[in-house]
Structures are given as C-alpha cells and as structure tokens.
Image (cartoon, rainbow, N blue to C red):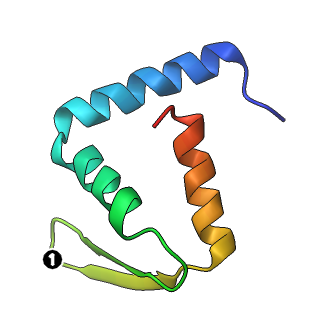
C-alpha cells in the first residue's frame, strides 16, 4: 500500500525536524553518498543504550544495495 500525500508531508516534516536536531547527521550522510557509497563498502552500526548496553552489526554493500540507497536519495530530493 502506497503512502498517501498527507503521510508523505508529515514524514517530510519529521525528517526536517530530525535534521534540525541533529545537523551533522545529514551532512555525514551526504559525504558518505558522495565518497563512500559503492559496491564493497562495509557499513558498521553500533547502538549504545542509556544504560551502556551495546548492539553491533554491519553490512557489506552490493551493487543492488547502492542503487537502493541512491533511489532513496532521489525520493528525498537529495
């Protein structure tokens, strides 16, 4: 089911608010997109909870993954 226009506008507002709260993150993503988003790149994820617990994982990008992320960027107008 495709999202309706009101949901898309609400999501856009939330994305904009997130970017205002965390201005370095969109810049980081833009840098990654322009310099590191390529087949074979490994993306590491680490989340630390307030109590210090950590969760870690990673993915190695395929050409299909790169195209997926580029498509997301085009949807976002970036």
Please state which of residues 34 and 27 is positioned toward the viewer in this rendering: 34
In the image, residue 74 above or below residue 54: above
Residue 27 position within the rendered picture, expressed as x and y whole percent measured from the top left: 24, 47
Image side of residue 22 versus residue 4, left or right: left
The image quarter in which residue 64 lies: bottom right
Q: Quadrant of residue 48?
A: bottom left
Q: Residues within 10 Å of mark 1 (few under 14, many from 20)?
A: few
- From the top left corner, tell me how far across and down residue 9 is, in percent: 54, 17
Looking at the image, which residue is at 58% across and 47% down? 72
Helix, strand or loop for disc 1: loop
Quadrant of the rendering where the C terminus is positioned: top left
Q: Which residue is mark 1?
A: 52
Quick check: 68 above or below 62? above
The residue positioned farthest toward the top in the image shown? 6
In this view, 5 is above or below 12: above
Is 36 placed left or right of 9 in the picture?
A: left
Query: Which quarter of the figure is the N terminus placed in?
Result: top right
Residue 59 falls left or right of residue 2: left
Q: Position of residue 63 (x, y in %)?
A: 64, 75
- The structure residue drawn at horizontal position 18% and vertical position 35%, both measured from the top left corner, is 21
Horizontal side of residue 61 vs 52, given as left or right: right
In depth, the one of 30 and 10 nearer the eye is 30
Count every numbered label the image shows and give the total: 1
Q: Residue furthest front?
A: 35
Residue at x 23% of width, y 80% of height: 53
């Amino acid at each position: 089911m495709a999202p309706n226009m009101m949901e898309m506008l609400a999501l856009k507002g939330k994305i904009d608010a997130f970017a205002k709260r965390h201005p370095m993150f969109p810049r980081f993503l833009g840098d990654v997109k322009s310099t590191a988003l390529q087949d074979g790149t490994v993306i590491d994820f680490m989340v630390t909870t307030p109590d210090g617990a950590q969760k870690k994982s990673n993915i190695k990008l395929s050409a299909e993954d790169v195209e997926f992320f580029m498509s997301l960027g085009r949807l976002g107008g970036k």
